[in-house]
Amino acid sequence: MGEHKQPGTRKRTEPSLGDIGQLDGDVHARKPAATPTPARAGKGGADDRPVPPAPTTGWASAWRRRSVRWGLLAVLVLGIAVLAWSQQDALRALFPRTQLNTLLVRADKALAAGHLDGNDGTSARELYSAVRALEPDNEQAIDGLRKVGQAELARARKAIAARNYELAQNALANARSLLGGGDAVHAVAAILLKARQSQAQTDILITRAQQALAAGKLDGDQGAAALYRQALAADPDNAVARHGMDKVGDALAVQARTALDQGQLDQAGDLIGRIALLMPGYADLPSLRASLSQARQQAQAAIDAHLKQADDALRAGHVSGTGEDNALAQYQAVLKIDPNNAQARTGIGQVAQALLLRARASIDAQDFGDASKLLKQATALAPHSADLAAVRAHLQRAQADAAQVNASRLDPAQQARLDKLLARARAAVQAGDFLLPPGASAYDLYSEALNIDGNNPDALQGLQGLAGQARTRFDQALSSGNLQQAGKMLSVLQQLVPGDPSHESMRRRLAGAWLDRAEQKLDAGNRDAALQALNAAGKLRPDAPRLQSLRTRIGRSS
């Protein structure tokens, strides 16, 4: 009988999870090795030991591993949900804080970019205000709104400087609402108010200037030029006022060219000088000056020719007449070209003196008709000549003597009238009223006295002494700097003693004093006064060497 053997004891295998890293791997990657089948007892007999379970297939093992993984994920999700439910208040608080931070960042960027206010939700003011709506005590938002207010205040100042008063008013209103007033806001408001008032005044000036320009009134205190200049003084960049000044320049230029065409060179020079004073940069100014210079050269050539013919005729005794071959006609031709020509005026006075000499000769020859005719011609040339009054009185005495009338004996009424006239004449001399006012001047009063008594020595001496009085006052006015008074006395002398050669030296002295004043005013920066003095000198001596150099300086000082 064969020997019966006990089955061998098998080694126990402990359960384990296996290699976790293989959970997601290929289920066929690692198959467990097949367990060897133990030998059966007996020959061909059945083994009575328990048969081990068959090895697990690959798909079943993968399914179990996936189930574990989804289970763990479900547990994790459930845990997160429970945690979120228990901390929901804290999580809810995180969302507004994030929104606040986003709004603040956007608000700061808008402030930095100068986007201060608006109504589309993107301005600094709107964004900072949105933050305060969420958190009223947010310090960053409060400080941001203060900065917006300060920026609006700065914008208002800049707008005032640019004369954009509507923008300035809006910015100031925003600043006031954000800053709640304060000294800075009040100061800017005061500046804006003053600027608006100035603008209103400027607008009034421009309106008045436009009206004056339309009426053709260019000069004077209420002329278009003066009014536009006042507007520009208040608002130098005012385009309307600048355009108005250009129109004034155009109108003055038209007048200047008209004067040039008519040969009125002094008037043209005054107009061109006024353009230079008002608008130194006027585009047509160089052309006008060139035209004036050319016209003066041509006029001077014609003047020189007339003066030579006049002097030749005077020496030849051709004093006056009906044609052009006499001194009077040639001197008058010069005055048509240059009304202020000193040589021609002196020549006219010499013609008048020559006529008076002829009148005396006619009186002595008892040719009273010719004497009267000559006196009439002399009166037309030198109506205020002292010699004229004396010769006229001489004619009256001669006519009275010829009529055998005793002109030296006066009745009491005539003597009283004569004494009164002489007293008034002396008072007029003391007042400096040599030729004006008419009827009350020293010249008229002495002349009336001679009409009563042609031999009265006081009247004759007083009349002949007027020129000396005028010279004394001229010297006094010139030394004291009263150049207007000196000019007045020179004009008196030219009428009292026309043709006196001493007038030329007096004219030169006065012109030099005006040029000195022009230079002083220019050095002091007073262009208007300098130009006025220069024009006065130019009328006395248009050929003065310093005249053109000072005109150039005034042009450069603009």
Image: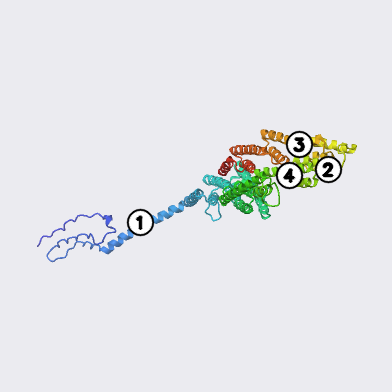
Q: Does dot 1 land on a helix, a strand or a loop?
A: helix
Q: Does dot 4 land on a helix, a strand or a loop?
A: helix
Q: Which quadrant of the rendered structure holds the N terminus?
A: bottom left
Disc 4 marks which amino acid? Leu
Using residue 45 as the reference point, say whether residue 450 is left or right of it.
right
**Which of the 4 quarters of the picture holds residue 487?**
top right
Tell me the CA gap for discs 4 and 2: 19 Å
Tell me the CA gap for discs 2 and 1: 158 Å
Establish if 166 lies above or below 414: below
* Residue placed under numbered mark 1 in the picture: 72
Disc 1 marks which amino acid? Leu
Please name whichever residue, 354 or 469, is drawn nearer the observer in this view of the structure.
354
Disc 2 marks which amino acid? Gln
Tell me the CA gap for discs 1 and 4: 146 Å
- Crowding near the residue tagged with mark 1, few <14, some 14–19, many ≥20 C-alpha atoms within 10 Å: few
Using residue 381 as the reference point, say whether residue 312 is left or right of it.
left
Tell me the CA gap for discs 3 and 4: 18 Å
Tell me the CA gap for discs 3 and 1: 143 Å
Q: Earlier in the sequence, mark 3 or mark 4?
A: 4
Q: Residue 518: x percent and y percent?
A: 61, 39
- Whether pointer 3 and pointer 4 mark residues with C-beta atoms closer than 8 Å, the reply is no
Q: Earlier in the sequence, mark 4 or mark 2?
A: 4
Disc 3 marks which amino acid? Gln
* Residue placed under numbered mark 3 in the picture: 464
Q: Residue 558: x percent and y percent?
A: 57, 44
* Residue placed under numbered mark 2 in the picture: 399
Disc number at residue 355?
4
Please name whichever residue, 296 or 40, is drawn nearer the observer in this view of the structure.
296
Give the foreground label among 3 and 4.
4
Establish if 536 lies above or below 86: above
Q: Does dot 2 land on a helix, a strand or a loop?
A: helix
